[in-house]
Image (cartoon, grey):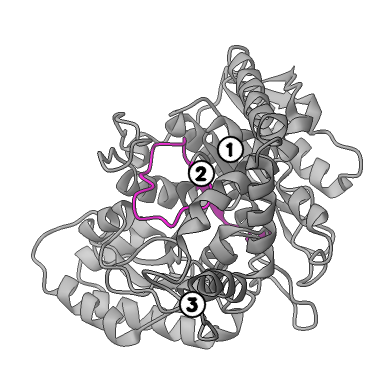
Amino acid sequence: MKNQSISDTLKLIKSKKISIKELSNNYINEINKNKDLNAFIYFNEEKILERAEKLDNMKEDLPLKGIPLGIKDLFCTKNMPTTAGSKILSNFQPTYESFVTKKLLNSGALFLGKTNLDEFAMGSSTTTSFFGNTINPVSSENKKLVPGGSSGGSAAAVAANLCLGATGTDTGGSIRQPASFCGVIGMKPTYGLCSRWGIIAFSSSLDQAGIFANNIQDASILMYEMAGYDPNDSTSSNVEIPKYHDNLNSNVDGKIIGIPEEYSLPGISDEINQVWDKAIKVFEKGGAKIKKIKLPHTKYALPAYYIIAPAEASSNLARYDGVKYGFRSENISSLEEMYELTRSEGFGKEVKRRILIGTYVLSAGYYDAYYIKAQKVRKLISNDFRDAFKECDFILTPTTPSPAFPIGEKEDDPIKMYLNDIFTVPASLAGLPGISIPYGTSKEGLPLGVQILSKHFNEQEIFNAGYYLEQNNE
């Protein structure tokens, strides 16, 4: 069953060449064999086989019937715990299903379990989880590498063939960066295409659900099943969702590909630039025109993001206080102590750092100087992209400034860790769709990805451009 595609697996199930129970047993065995990767936080064999049997006995033909998926542990799931990778929610069992996971279940998907992540999705390495580090499947025995973050468990699970696809969330690059590090497809749709209802909030104006898959076709199938309008989410967009997989087309003749000057940064390794150049040449070969473009406010994206995201996190995480649900400190003798000790014992270092930054930039006297200014910068970045898309159909950039790095390497310096998101954050601030496609390797044989960005709700064209690159990857 190695790296079987979703469409091929659906055909095998439909023709009864394999039962959903047999398929599930294959993936259960793979997960058990690869427990050292720590890709899954929650995994219950009994529940998997129960669901498989139910699907096998179902007469109805569903679009994802029996397809085994990993679910990032930020999505609330009615029959599985949801922890956000944090001690503070380590005993939390939701009473409801998130909109996205409900859609996938209604399509017949089979959830293998909940995947590991950076605590509350805050991180770029999946090393801040209360449940331990996830290890990148491309690691060698003597050099354990990060899978990227925050959706590192999902990326690692797909890369190690522990599932056929996985959900992720992307706030500033948390799908695209781990996809690049693990050598899989990672798609972040337009902000508002997938509902945020039932996803544990980090930064509400940036968080967006997305997908990991082994190939473009699988990603387009899963995205169609996940996307859709949700009246419970005030930021959900009521737009028509095309059948992306039926409309896949690898013709890029006449398309204009924008290459932003600002993404050619000093200090970026030659191997990253070589992969970028390779993708540019492949697009040219297909008849696409290459155009140099300017995104002048790019250099302000990271500072603006690290003001806006922590500010929203500080507000969203105020609800974890030991009163209604989740962890509560036992060493308390007053209400004030309960709040203080629950939060100091329940949150990890990175989450506390971001809450403090966020609370600071929202405090009296600093709100205008930091938060309001960052929102104005965000608007300028958004305008840059709007102007650029008047001149080009897509923008092509590297996904990350480096290949996957060893676990522990950047943990002492948060700024170095934040710089991992330098190529992904601008599109997040503008709410644009983006995909990372594996397109080469470093000198050490580690995966490197390229990123394709386009206008809002232009997912079909992104899938098509990605499909062309995938088919022309020498």
Q: Residue at x 48, y 34 (%)?
A: 464
Residue drawn at 69 percent across, 68 percent down: 349
Judging by the rendered image, the residue that carries numbered circle 3 is 41
Residues shaded magenta? 181-204
Q: Nearer the viewer, residue 63 or 111?
A: 111
Give residue 351's quadrant in the image. Answer: bottom right
Q: Quadrant of residue 117?
A: bottom right
- Residue pointed to by mark 1: 428
Circles 3 and 1, Cβ within 8 Å, touching? The answer is no
Q: Is residue 16 in sight in this rendering? A: yes
Question: Of the residues under marks 2 and 1, which one precedes in the sequence?
Answer: 2
Check disc 2 and report the residue beneath it.
188
Q: Magenta stretch: dominant SS?
A: loop
Residue 121 at x, y = what percent? Answer: 56, 59
Judge by depth and name the residue closer to the eye, 334 or 263.
Answer: 334
**196 part of magenta stretch:** yes
Distance from label 2 to label 3 (Cα)? Answer: 23 Å
What's the amino acid at mark 3?
Ile
Please state, as top left, top right, bottom left or bottom right, where the N terminus lies in the image: bottom left
Q: Residue furthest front?
A: 334
Nearer the N terminus, badge 2 or badge 3? 3
Which of disc 1 and disc 3 is earlier in sequence?
3
Q: Is 429 on the left or on the right of 70, as rendered?
A: right
Give the structural element (helix, strand or loop) at label 3. Answer: strand
Task: Characterize the local packing of mark 1: few (<14), some (14-19) or many (20 or more) Cα atoms within 10 angstroms.
Answer: many
What secondary structure is found at the residue carrying circle 1?
helix
The reply, left or right, for residue 121 in relation to residue 439 is left
